[in-house]
Image (cartoon, rainbow, N blue to C red):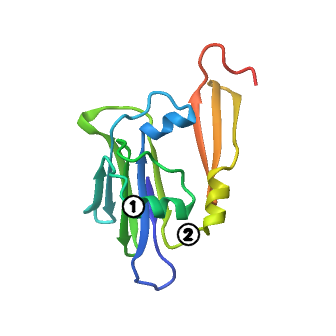
Amino acid sequence: MGFALGRGTSTSSRPVLLRGVGPALGSFWVSDVLLDPRLIVMDSRGAVVGSNDDWSGERTLVEVTRAVGAFQLVSGAKDAAALLSLPPQAYTVQVTGANGTCGVALAEAYDGSETLSPGEAQRYQTAPESEFTYDSPNGKVNIKTRRAGERLMIVVTPATEGEGND
């Protein structure tokens, strides 16, 4: 995943919450998740500027996650998360499996300087989820959505046998 930071001529660094989510996706009915994601962040030159494997549930990460309106990760889980102070430029985020494992993962980037009030964060974290099946030209797929702050999380998976009656 790529993202860029920059506002006009500003050279100030800003906090960015980056996450490589695998195991936590199971609570959103995603199967075949990446059981042990590893997060690597590189700048526009390809230099590694941050990484994480098995986030610790650190209090600051929990607070920033809540403040930006993202769903919480379970403390001690194998999901990856890092809070980095990054200057304006383009970045690449890689989410890979530890020991070469494969599975479904979600890469996320949140601007930690744009936080929600506690009331807004609570409202977004308890926002209803929706699920429906779409009959695409390549077969049926399940689409699940959940609002997370000002963002919308969308997970698309192939429909299994017997699904798709929505």
84 shown above or below 139: below
Which residue has dot 1 on it?
A: 59
- Front-most of residues 72 and 49: 72
Q: Amino acid at mark 1?
A: Arg
Q: Give the SS element for disc 2.
A: loop
Name the residue: 58% across, 39% down: 155
Extreme residue in the bottom direction: 9
Quarter of the rendering occupied by the C terminus = top right
Q: Position of residue 108 (x, y in %)?
A: 47, 53
Q: Could you tell whether 104 is left or right of 37 in the image? A: right
Q: Give the SS element for disc 1.
A: helix
> Splitting the image into 4 quarters, where does residue 117 fall?
bottom right
Comparing marks 2 and 1, which lies closer to the viewer?
1
> Splitting the image into 4 quarters, where does residue 163 fall?
top right
22 shown above or below 48: above
Which is more N-terminal, label 1 or label 2? Answer: 1
Name the residue: 39% across, 47% down: 75
Name the residue: 44% across, 58% down: 62
> Splitting the image into 4 quarters, where does residue 51 fall?
bottom left
Extreme residue in the right direction: 166
Which residue has dot 2 on it?
A: 115
10 shown above or below 136: below
Q: Could you tell whether 137 is left or right of 156 in the image? A: right
